[in-house]
Amino acid sequence: MNLNLSIKPEEEIQIIIHHWIRTLNIKLGWIKDFDKIIVNYVSSFASTFFMFDTFRSSSKLLNTFTGHTNYVWGIDYSTFDDCQLICSGSGDKTVRVWDVDNNKQIQSFNGHSSEVCCVRFSSYYYHNHRQNVICSSSNDKTIRFWDFKHNKQLQIFNEHTGYVYSIKFSPFNGGRYLCSGSNDKTIRLWDIETSKSLHIFNGHEDIVCCVDISPLQSNNNNDK
């Protein structure tokens, strides 16, 4: 989609949002059951992300979260103990947690030594260990787990030899498994319960930018 370079950033955001609404209404009719969408808006001057009420006629801005001092490369949304939370990762090397209902930052981690590319909430830690945990990947070649309730780092995966651009938890086994993609040209599969690397996929000839895990193709048992 081509945008007129003379328009204001706020107008550009609205154009993007309305384009998404038209696309999603065509391709995903069920999404009208939701009334909010979180937008990570990255530009040459943006270190802010926004929450919009997009599936109503107004497409009004609900919240603005400001605090990062560099690009915001990744966000994730989840609920913990009935609280709506967003986590974010930035070029300022920090991982931050935001309380949506109160519109405020509640935690910040600065353990990475380079840009944070991707962040994910861990449902496995929450449901199996009652811990509120974020996973983050970085250009420092590491994947780290943070307990944001007790303000501490839990574990670190450091077997990639290049930037780790993308991470994704499995949609099965309660999110026990994590895959990661890196500019070392590999995809790795991890067991977060044992902190072990289970497999390395070496088929790519260049940078791995994005990863996902397919749901299990089983009609009988979704736990294997």
Image: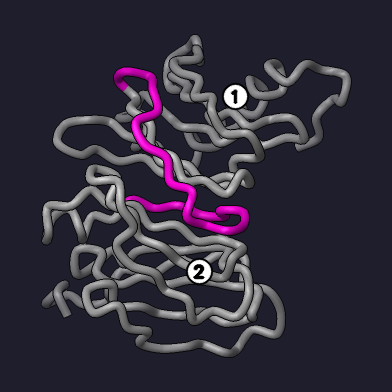
Which range is magenta?
101-121
Viewer-closest of 217 and 9: 9
Rendered residue at 14%/74% (across/down): 223
Left or right: 212 with respect to 186? left
Residue 142's tag is 2
Q: Position of residue 44 (x, y in %)?
A: 77, 35
Q: Is residue 32 magenta?
A: no
Q: Is residue 102 magenta?
A: yes
Q: Which colour assignment does the render follow? A: one colour
Q: Which residue is mark 1?
A: 18
Q: At label 2, which amino acid type do we have?
A: Thr
Q: At label 1, which amino acid type do we have?
A: His
Residue 180 appears in the rendering: yes
Label 2: few (<14), some (14–19) or many (≥20) C-alpha neighbours in 10 Å: many
CB under 8 Å between callouts 1 and 2? no
Which corner quadrant holds the N terminus? top right
Q: Quadrant of residue 181?
A: bottom right
Viewer-closest of 205 and 218: 205
Q: Quadrant of residue 209?
A: bottom right
Which corner quadrant holds the C terminus? bottom left
Q: Position of residue 117 (x, y in %)?
A: 57, 55
Left or right: 70 with respect to 35? right
What is the secondary structure assignment of the residue under circle 2? loop
What is the secondary structure assignment of the residue under circle 1? helix
